[in-house]
Structures are given as structure tokens and as C-alpha cells.
Amino acid sequence: MPKLVVLTVGFNERSLDVKPEKTTIGRLEDNQFCLSEPSVSSHHCEVWAKGDEIVVKDLGSTNGSFVNEKQLEAGKEVTVRPGQTLRLGQVELRYETGKKQTEQARATVKLGEGGGQTIVMSKNSAFAKKSNNINKIFLAVGGLLVVVIVVLLIKALTSVSGSGQ
């Protein structure tokens, strides 16, 4: 049976069996699945099973719903496939089918197909390398500093050798 397994610390061992009927997830107790965390809205989203996939619909949450870090539009239905992650505010969940990881599909994202957002599998998100722009910025700034230091050293050496004559 499809299920969402909560990965966030403090919610360990919690999971939701996703059924064909719509299930509401949110911070308040009147949801079928309550995530008592400040970043989760009172009534954050709805989920339901559709074959081997689950469908998620954000209910206009304050901090947003994300599938593999792509934000969902409020009110739009998005398909999530096995192995992908769903983040509600700061709470992260992974969609699992109970099959071995190698049997589950791999993930990438296609947006805007058929008037909604569709998640299509092609890359295993559990082992996908995450983009880290901070490393790129750090390397660029470091490279620029090296160039400036070299230029200053050349200038200093030139002025020392010029004054020594």
C-alpha cells in the first residue's frame, strides 16, 4: 500500500497509508493526519492514491508544499511517484510503495503538463546529487581573490625592483 513516511526528526516512525479517498494533512487535530509543527498550516494539503502514484493538492498553505523541492501551486493537483519527497513547510516525507528501492521508478520533474504539474520518474531522488550554488559562489569568490593577490604581488615586486635600481 502506498504510504508517506515522515523523515523529519521528531516525527520519526510516523507514516500515513495513502488511500484512494482524499486525506487532509495539517497542524490541527481535525485533519486525518496531524503534523503538529508550526511550519505546517492548519489544513496544509490533501493526498490520495491513484494507482502506483499519489496525488497532492496544496490547500493554500502559508509555507508551501514542495515535491523534490519544486513548489506546488495552491489548488493544483500534482502527481508524486515512488521515492520522491514531499515537503510541507519544514516537514519532509518520502513516498514509498513497500517495494524494494530498485523496483521503484526514478524521478525528475515536468511542470505544466495537461494544465497541472506532473512529476515524471527518471532519476533516483534518494541518491541524486543536490545542486549547491553556495559552493559555486565560494569557488568564484576564491578564484577572484587569488587573481587579485597575484596582481598585487606582481605590482609590489615590480615597484621593489624598480626602486632598487
Image (cartoon, grey):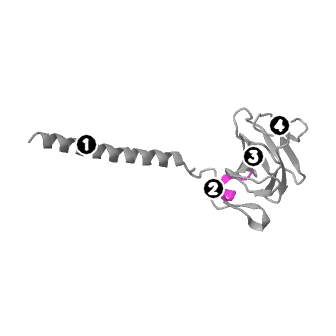
Query: Regarding mark 4 in the picture, which secondary structure is present there?
Result: loop
Tell me which secondary structure the magenta stretch mostly adopts. loop
Name the N-terminal-most of marks 4 and 1: 4
Q: Position of residue 100 (x, y in %)?
A: 69, 52
Image mark for residue 153? 1
Q: Which residue is mark 2?
A: 124
**Which SS class for mark 1?**
helix
Judge depth for marks 4 and 3 and give the one in front.
3
Give the amino acid type for the residue marked by disc 1 in the picture.
Leu
Q: Amino acid at mark 2?
A: Asn
Q: Pointer 3: what residue?
A: 64
Q: Position of residue 94 (x, y in %)?
A: 72, 47
Q: Kindly identify which residue carries mark 4.
A: 27
Q: Nearer the viewer, mark 1 or mark 2?
A: 1
Bounds of the magenta span?
98-108
For the C terminus, the image quarter is top left
